């Protein structure tokens, strides 16, 4: 066979060191993709992750079939807060004594007393002057008010809140309030004696019609009492009432007689009548309710409740993520991998991209489907879900998918360092899932639970929070009621930080450690 | 011609063990180089060092004149098989090759070619976890051939092969070398390399013991030895030993005689009326040559049974 002898040289003559740059990485990506899709167990695992996410959400929705429905199957009116001009749910319920105001004008009152009616005065009881588009709940407004324990405030359109002097009304020490309208601008001022005034601020309420309502109001929100302990929390609450006494009322530009209305009256109360009395220019008004943004209640009326099963899907993703690398270490296949691509950090990055991409895609389908399915079930059950803007819905859905993807990549990075599947799954589950369960299931009191949700990768669950926390609204802001200690993107950034840190350490380790 | 693999001054310590202790050798194209030494001599460590899997304390290992870790599409330069069982059991053999092919920018057609070449056949579509060791060796060899590399480095590829498989593997390796490729083939059993390797690199305790062609080694071991067939073995040995020869019995009917020319042997046997039926030049086996080579090397015996004998006599 001497004649058949041929010279064999490398595929790239003299090109041993030729780099192919991007195409080099794309072949590596394709290789890792092939690895992933050729292990049936991992594909089944992805399916399981999607299914448990959807199923747990669905089961929890079906189990919560306790909401009341109206005669035609619609949601009970009492459960449905009005919407403001932007479509946000806003409780808008108070006692209003008003008269029309055409064009610019102002109202000045002396608030003599603000007291709790049949109980202690609520910290966020409100009494003062309001300019409102009309008597429809949810319509635009600006209000200059005294609160139970938060001083004088100028608030507008449910979300705006400016603090004035931190004073309170006590016997013999009344407070003078004034609200002036000039076009869209409403200026609030406060005075101790009716002659020396200081301005609190100016709110711009755009689109107010020429003719609006102006008058006095009083409201007092629900009292919520939460006891935190190990193993759970107890929340109790109920409506409160407050009584305000106004006198020395003077106005400019206002016309007509005073009319009393209870804005946002409850269902079965077709003609809401305001609880007020006038006696020689002194108005004594009693009111209940709040003018504020809506916050999620402990009953879980938020859209992200549909994704309550994500923690289970997350555990499955963590298993897949860790196996994607530890399976190679188990039998030594990692040596074949590094023989095929000796630049080990590139392998790590390619694995992270493939795993992250696959789990993001699956997570996106699963969370979008759960979001739609569970939302539909809850609505057909007559459960009211707080409306949230489309962008927020997208953030919740895509954020949940990213949460799954990042956790899988975190497991991959830890897997590089640990090299054993069991240890990796245990460590990452302990870091990323257990704190969430301890917190939302109220196994820990709110303090430690919130601390865990700040520092562990489980902080990333905050990306699912669709409603906000407002300082001017007292509510049960606990992880168990769906409120995370960090803002959505801040919590997400904590998870990203953990993942990047773990990838960085994994890169260091994989570069330096012998692969034997 | 530039060596395909060139290692020089390799040093590697694992804790208290000096696994490689200044090892230097090279592998040349067109021949099969046997890489021999007892278990623990450093063969696998050397191969891992060539692939850049283990970092060296000192020395260099070059493939085609470059460090392996600097190669792009390295499987087109050097195909290696370190551990046939290093695979994901739930992946099919074909898919195990496919991800490797994709990492080098190669496609499924090349995978099917090496499946054909390695004799995996229909088994390639089954999960690799169910393969016998022999099948895994074929799969591993297929992986080494994927990039059509000019150099192959195989660690104990005969392990687990049945006699038919061993014969097939020898034939394939010989034809690969015949195509001008360099093949480095490790084994701890010299007999496996018989009729396969044409060059030998023998190491012990991480150091080079011999770097020689097989022909030279056997010729040296066989030098001036004569094999005598006789039914009167005891008598023949006595007569020849008295005349100053070194005599060893191989089987019931023959002895091997050294340091005595053939004519003298015939004369002595006739003179002493010792019947014999044949006389031939003796050719040592590779195994015997290896034993000769390492007989005086204490390091080769540290793990062997002779060690206790030596101590008993001391």
Image (cartoon, helix red, strand yellow):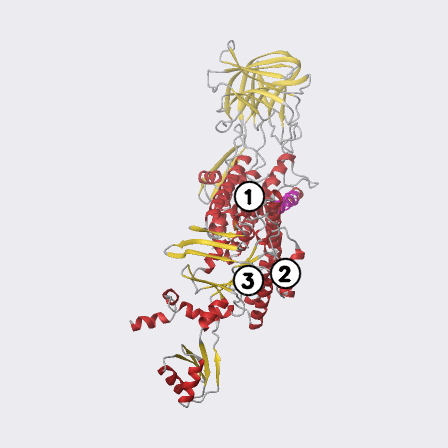
Q: Earlier in the sequence, mark 3 or mark 2?
A: 3
Question: Seen from this angle, which residue lies furthest bottom?
Answer: B273
User: What's the residue at 49%, 21% (across, down)?
Assistant: A151
Q: Secondary structure at mark 1?
A: helix
Which residue corresponds to mark 3?
B31
Q: Is residue A273 above or below residue B273?
A: above
Identify the subunit bearing mark 3.
B
Which residue corresponds to mark 2?
B114
Say left or right for B247 vs A65: left
Question: Seen from this angle, which residue lies furthest top?
Answer: A195
How far apart marks 2 and 1 lie (CA) works out to 38 Å
User: In the rendered structure, are the residues bearing label 3 and label 2 in contact, judged by CB atoms less than 8 Å apart?
Assistant: no
Q: Which mark is on residue A406?
A: 1
A374 is within the stretch colored magenta = yes
Image position, residue B211 (x, y; %): 46, 62
Q: Nearer the viewer, mark 3 or mark 2?
A: 3
Q: Which residues are magenta?
A: A360-375
Work out whether residue B56 can be spotted. no
CA neighbours of label 1 inside 10 A, class few (<14), some (14 to 19), many (20+): many
Q: Nearer the viewer, mark 1 or mark 3?
A: 3
Q: Residue B263's quadrant in the figure?
A: bottom left
Q: Is the magenta region chiefly helix, strand or loop?
A: helix
User: What's the residue at 43%, 88% (across, down)?
Assistant: B270
Image position, residue A362 (x, y; %): 62, 47
Q: Secondary structure at mark 2?
A: helix
Identify the subunit bearing mark 1.
A
**In the depicted view, which residue is nearer to us: A43 or B242?**
B242
Question: Seen from this angle, which residue lies furthest right?
Answer: A72
A235 is within the stretch colored magenta = no
Count all numbered tags in the image, as a single digit.
Answer: 3
Q: Is residue B121 above or below residue A128?
A: below
């Amino acid at each position: 066979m001497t004649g058949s002898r041929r010279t064999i040289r490398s595929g790239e003559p003299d090109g041993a060191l030729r780099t192919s740059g991007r195409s080099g990485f794309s072949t590596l990506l394709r290789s890792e993709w092939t690895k992933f899709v050729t292990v049936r167990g991992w594909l089944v695992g992805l399916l399981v992750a999607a299914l448990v996410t959807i199923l747990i959400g669905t089961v929890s929705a079906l189990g919560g079939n306790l909401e009341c429905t109206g005669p035609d199957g619609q949601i009970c009116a009492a459960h449905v807060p009005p919407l403001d001009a932007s479509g946000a749910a806003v409780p808008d319920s108070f006692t209003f004594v008003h008269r029309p105001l055409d064009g610019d004008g102002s109202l000045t009152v002396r608030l003599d007393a603000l007291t709790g009616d049949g109980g202690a005065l609520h910290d966020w009881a409100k009494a003062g002057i309001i300019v409102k588009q009309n008597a429809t709940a949810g319509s635009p407004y600006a209000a200059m008010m005294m609160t139970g324990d938060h001083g004088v405030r100028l608030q507008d359109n449910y979300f705006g809140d400016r603090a004035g002097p931190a004073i309170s009304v006590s016997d013999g020490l009344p407070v003078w309030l004034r609200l002036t309208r000039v076009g869209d601008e409403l200026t609030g001022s406060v005075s101790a004696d009716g002659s020396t005034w200081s301005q609190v601020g100016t709110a711009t309420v755009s689109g107010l019609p020429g003719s609006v309502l102006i008058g006095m109001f009083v409201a007092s929100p629900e009292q919520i009492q939460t006891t935190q302990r190990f193993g759970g929390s107890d929340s109790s609450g109920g409506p409160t009432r407050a009584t305000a006494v106004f006198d020395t009322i003077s106005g400019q530009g206002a016309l007509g007689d005073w009319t009393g209305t209870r804005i946002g009256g409850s269902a079965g109360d077709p003609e809401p009548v305001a609880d007020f009395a006038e006696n020689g220019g002194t108005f004594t008004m009693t009111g209940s309710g709040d003018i504020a943004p809506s916050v999620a209640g402990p009953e879980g009326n938020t859209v992200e409740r549909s994704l309550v099963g994500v923690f289970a899907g997350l555990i499955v993703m963590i298993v897949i993520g860790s196996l994607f690398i530890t399976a190679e270490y188990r039998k030594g296949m990692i040596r074949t991998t590094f023989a095929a691509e000796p630049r080990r950090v590139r392998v790590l990055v390619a694995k992270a991209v493939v795993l992250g991409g696959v789990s993001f895609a699956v997570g996106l389908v699963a969370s979008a489907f759960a979001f739609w399915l569970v939302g539909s079930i809850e609505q057909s059950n007559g459960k009211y879900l707080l409306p949230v803007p489309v962008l927020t819905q997208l953030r919740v859905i895509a954020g949940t998918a990213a949460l799954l993807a990042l956790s899988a990549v975190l497991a991959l990075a830890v897997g590089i360092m640990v090299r054993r599947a069991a240890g990796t799954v245990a460590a990452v589950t302990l870091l990323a899932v257990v704190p969430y369960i301890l917190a939302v299931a109220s196994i820990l009191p709110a303090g430690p639970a919130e601390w865990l949700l700040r520092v562990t990768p489980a902080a990333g669950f905050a990306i699912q929070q669709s409603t906000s926390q407002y300082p001017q609204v007292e509510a049960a802001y606990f992880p168990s009621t769906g409120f995370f200690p960090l803002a959505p993107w801040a919590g997400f950034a904590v998870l990203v930080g953990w993942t990047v840190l773990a990838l960085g350490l994994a890169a260091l380790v994989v570069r330096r450690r012998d692969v034997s | 011609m530039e060596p395909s693999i060139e290692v020089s001054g390799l040093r590697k310590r694992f804790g208290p063990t000096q696994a490689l202790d200044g090892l230097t050798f090279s592998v040349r194209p067109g021949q099969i180089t046997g890489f021999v030494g007892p278990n623990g001599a450093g063969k696998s460590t050397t191969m891992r060092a060539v692939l850049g899997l283990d970092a060296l304390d000192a020395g260099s290992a070059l493939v085609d004149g470059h460090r392996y870790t600097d190669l792009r599409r390295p499987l087109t330069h050097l195909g290696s098989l370190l551990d046939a069982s290093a695979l994901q059991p739930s992946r099919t053999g074909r898919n195990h090759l496919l991800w490797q092919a994709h990492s080098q920018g190669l496609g499924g057609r090349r995978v099917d070619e090496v499946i054909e070449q390695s004799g995996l056949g229909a088994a390639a579509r089954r999960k690799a976890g169910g393969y016998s060791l022999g099948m895994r060796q074929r799969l591993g060899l297929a992986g080494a051939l994927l990039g059509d590399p000019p150099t192959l480095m195989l660690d104990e590829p005969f392990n687990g092969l049945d006699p038919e498989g061993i014969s097939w593997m020898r034939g394939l390796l010989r034809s690969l070398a015949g195509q001008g490729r360099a093949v480095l083939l490790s084994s701890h059993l010299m007999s496996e390399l018989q009729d396969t390797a044409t060059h030998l690199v023998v190491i012990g305790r991480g150091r080079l013991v011999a770097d020689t062609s097989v022909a030279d080694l056997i010729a040296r071991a066989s030098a001036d030895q004569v094999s005598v067939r006789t039914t009167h073995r005891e008598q023949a040995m006595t007569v020849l030993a008295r005349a100053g020869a070194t005599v060893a019995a191989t089987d019931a009917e023959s002895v091997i005689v050294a340091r005595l020319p053939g004519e003298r042997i015939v004369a002595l046997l006739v003179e002493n009326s010792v019947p014999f039926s044949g006389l031939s030049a003796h050719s040592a086996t590779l195994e015997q040559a290896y034993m000769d080579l390492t007989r005086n090397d204490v390091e080769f015996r540290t793990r062997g049974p002779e060690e206790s004998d030596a101590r008993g006599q001391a």
